[in-house]
Image: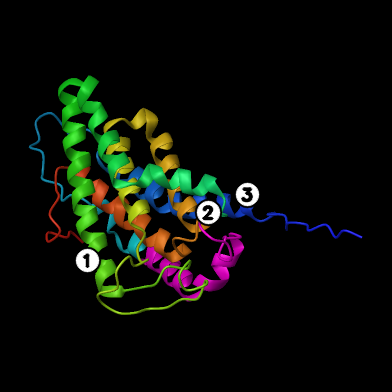
Amino acid sequence: MVKTRHCPARRGRLPCCLLCALLCAAWALLAAGRAARADGPEPPDAEPAPKPAGRSLMTPWAVGAFGVVAGTLIATDRPALRLFDTDLGESPSERDRLPQRISFLGDGRTLLVASALPALWGGKHGRQATAKALKALATTTVAVTAVKYLVGKERPSRAAGRVRYRGPGLGDASFPSGHTAAAFAVATVMAHEYPRYRYLFWGIATAVGVARIQSAAHFPSDVWVGAGLGAYMGRRGAHGSTSLLSWSF
């Protein structure tokens, strides 16, 4: 008698995708919406006061809420990872290819090309949008690389889903997610410059974050912190500030 091998159904994938999508996008959407309301028209006779870039994202309630979610995810990384039915026990060639393909949208080369597109047809405004996106992408890359080097968190695919911190100097570290941070940085700039398509930009960035978890490249906390860091840097880039030292609280 021949035994038939049944593959386990991936029932939790879709609900978990939606949950992570809401979590990753909530902070960026809420903070960016508050910032947009704060940037209302000024009286014609009044001199415009300089607005520190990124200030609307650094209000106490925003930082507190973001920190609570980040801390909760860091403390529950391993059980939270299981909710996504991540392919930890499979080789890269056997894993679901869809998350890997979506992750490509957050690759640095892809984002460089995407950031350059507005300059080709958008005239002066398009060139400005491209410059802001490239600056935000560059500063985000610097910040992510520094944090990865200092924290040294091992990727779930290499630690069999266990949370391991190897300390400074670990190559190819997990925390935070560079793909997610870069995607949100560019998406936030483009959403500011082309608000009609803001949900499309943020949706793509969120999909990248979810894909990074399901491809066993990152823990949920890596994606959450990467999304927040990218959104903040993107907001600063959209307002012309790209300095990593002039933080505004």
| SS for callout 1 | helix
Magenta stretch? 64-92
Q: What sort of colour scheme is used for the picture? A: rainbow
- The residue that appears at 34% across and 46% down in the rendered structure is 107
Q: Which residue is mark 1?
A: 146
- The residue that appears at 26% across and 60% down in the rendered structure is 144
* Residue 71 percent across, percent down from the top left: 42, 72
Q: Which residue is mark 3?
A: 14
Badge 2 amino acid: Ser
Please state, as top left, top right, bottom left or bottom right, where the N terminus lies in the image: bottom right
Residue 240 quadrant: top left
Which secondary structure class fits the magenta region best? helix
- Which comes sooner in the sequence, label 3 or label 2? 3
- Is residue 152 at all visible to an observer of this figure? yes
Near mark 2 (Cα within 10 A), the count class, few <14, some 14-19 or many ≥20, is: few
Badge 3 amino acid: Leu
Magenta run includes residue 70: yes
Residues under numbered marks 2 and 1 in contact, where contact means CB atoms less than 8 Å apart: no
For residue 137, the mark is none
Magenta run includes residue 210: no
Badge 1 amino acid: Ala
Near mark 3 (Cα within 10 A), the count class, few <14, some 14-19 or many ≥20, is: few
Q: Which residue is mark 2?
A: 93
User: Alpha carbon of mark 3 to alpha carbon of mark 2: how far?
Assistant: 22 Å
